[in-house]
Image: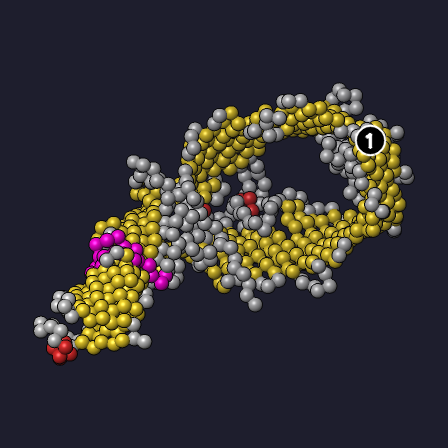
Amino acid sequence: MKNRLFVNCFFVFFLSFATNLFCSEIDISAKNVELLKEEQKIKAEGDVVVEDENGIIINADKVLFDKEKNIIDAEENVKIQDSLENNQIESDKMKFFRNDEKIFSIGKTLIKIKDLYEIVTKNILFENKTKSISSNEETIITDLYGNKIELEKFKYSNSSKNLRSQGKIKITDKLDNHYYFDDILINIEEKSIAGSNLKIRFNKNSFGNKENDPRLVAKSAIIENQNTSVNEGIFTTCKERKGKCPPWKLKAKKIVHDKKKKNIYYDHAVLNIYDVPILYIPKFFHPDPTVQRQSGLLTPSLTSSSLTGNGVNLPYYFALADHKDLTITPKLYIDENPLIQSEYRHKTKNSFSEIDTSFHRYKENTNKKLKGTRTHFFAKSDIDLDYIDFEESKLLIDIQRVSSDSYLKVHNLDSKLVSNKTHLTNSLEANFVKENIYFDFEMNVFENLTQNQSDRFEYVLPNFSLTKNLPSVGKIALMEFNSTGSYREFETNKKLAKLINKIYMKSVNFISEYGFVTNLEAQISNKNYNAQKTSSYKTESNSYELGGVAALTASWPLEKESNNSNKKFIPKFMIRSSPGSMRNVSEDQLKLDTNNVFSLNKLSDDIETGNSVIVGGNYIYENKNLNYETFNLALGQVFSLEKNSKMSKQSSLNQEISDLVGDMQVKFSENSSLDYKFSLDQNLNNLNYNEISSSFEIGNLIGNINFTEENNNIGSNNKYGGAGLKIDFDSSNSINFKTRKNFVTNETEFYNLSYQYENDCLRAALEFDRKFYSDNDLEPSDNLVFTITIIPFGKLGTPSIGSFND
């Protein structure tokens, strides 16, 4: 039970406790209260509560009140509550000088101001008359927004609601950005911070490169809940280089970060490259690093071409909603009419669609610049049909159209919806999966822009495939059923309808006690077709073909291991048999190589008939001190019992003995290798195919060379090659050269020479490009381009689209 003592002038005089006490009231309550008459003190212990007439409430485990000096000493779990201002001070020891209305804490102290700020410090002074709190010790302040403020000292005024500090000041926000000031003023009510001589070190991950040191310095700044305003600011993301200026920096008279809109605005900005001002912008803005999607100007780029002249791309991004957006890119030419390109993306719960389109009209028409409007229209949709009876059900729609064959090349238009600027595809595709059944259905229109109008289109309507995994034969073989069908119209008036059914079986590998590995493959095929005006198919009303093939493959892996090397020799042979006759595919394009020489069937729709033995193998040498194969040689050759004049001439499989095909790979080091592919005729006299490619790295020199030669049955004396060479002078400077040449016509298709300077935050390049072609709007062109890319701003692209909300 608590004892309560109420002290005033009359009560003290009545007890003859003292004659010189001040005439003010104090109320003390505690579990134990003891009056020390001789010492003129009151001692209280256990849940002590002290209240005075000025609204000061002290809670502690122990309190000693010296009436003569009018001082209260409080110890252990001391809490002082200013009931008028809603501030609280906590410490293990405090002194309350009532005459001066001052409270001192001794040791670590916690201060809570209006439940908005927590201050951890030492040895504070609380002056009740001026309602101020101060400390000359190191202090840490945290607020409701996750900011941490580190100070050398501070003084807080309850009347002005301002907290001031000078000296070393550091603020860390919830994104781990660090702010440094020489002095600050914190307004508690407005939740703002004003300071001078600001230095900000942003989180190294803020701009996508951990090697950067993004930072900002300014004369002064005001940090508010919704806005941060900086005066005379300088910003860069470049890595710090001692004693050197950053490769780029952006100076501005005023920088404002609107946290609500997530934009950063600049007034009177100047871009400096190595301390040289190169660009002045009165006003501009960009999204802050936390923004994934926001409307605004994307990175501009400069273009230069002898075909269209000089120009600039100015892409603008519209964030229409969380699940849809639009990018409009005007390509503004100095001597030509502008080209306008737009990209629209839309995401729903079960679909994602994209549309890419553009238009352009020449200012003046010539023999090359023909009159009329040029346009392109690309669209793609990926739709999840979400049929409950299927594990997977998808629909894909692809549309690709251009109004001029060379339009994409002339303006160097790139779109992620098209991978080839000369071959376009329009298609509708559906895919279904249920248990072990796979069904694909397609309708396609292919357009070859290099062909004349009558032969450029190929229609495949429809094209389907049905695959089902059949029950396995015990545990020794796997079986599969496949049915494909299509209807084609091509080369103006040729038509072909096909339905092919296949059953395929492959056994598991059987390994003998001597290490021989064998397996058996077989396929039965039923082909039904109707062909019109085709030379390689029967043109009767309906035709069908029944065929089958079986093969036994055996290999004998041999290995020799020593302390420094591991050598493998794997001889391999296949006995293959396919009775009956086959369609004439002698003019078809089919190249025999080490990838298909041991295939059960080398034709996609037909079965290669005849009896043959395929012989070949692999030799592999591995140096144990290295982590890669240093030498790998693969060989293969087909021996048939008789000639098959219906097989592809290019493949040499129409002969009793095919070409000897090989692939040799040599690795000289981790970054240097040689790959040699060849096809040697049966007499081992002539190379019908010869391909050499090599990549190498010698110090700062990086290069690649390739040469391809096609002779006799494979090609009509075709020889072409290319090369690339890059010299890295250091980590920032390099020269790059690329070229490609046709050695038969002695014509160079293109060559490209460029110089590039690059570091962690700046990329500059000077590039000369020459192209040798002439077609419609196209003509041979020389292009000299100089570009400067400010990283990360130059790396910004179309933001990722958000999720669709039901």
Where residue 462 sits: x, y (%)?
75, 55
Residue at the extreme top? 685
**Residue 401 in magenta stretch:** no
Most distant residue in the front direction:
38
Q: Residue furthest left?
A: 20
Can the viewer see residue 348 in this picture? yes
Residue in front for this viewpoint, 424 or 264: 264
Name the residue at 64% across, 43% down. 450
Residue positioned 28% across, 60% down in the render:
92
Q: x, y (%) of residue 302? A: 43, 45
Tell me the residue at 32%/43% (across/down).
Answer: 272
Q: With respect to residue 642, does 281 lie above or below?
A: below
Q: Position of residue 105 (x, y in %)?
A: 23, 60
- How many other residues sit within 10 Å of disc 1, few (<14), some (14-19) or many (≥20)? few
Q: Is residue 699 above or below residue 769?
A: above
| Res. 185 image quadrant | bottom left
Is any atom of residue 502 visible in this view? no
Q: Please tell me which residue lies in front, 544 or 615.
A: 615
Residue bounds of the magenta highlight: 119-145
Locate the N terminus and report the quarter of the image it occupies.
bottom left
| 467 vs 92: above or below | above
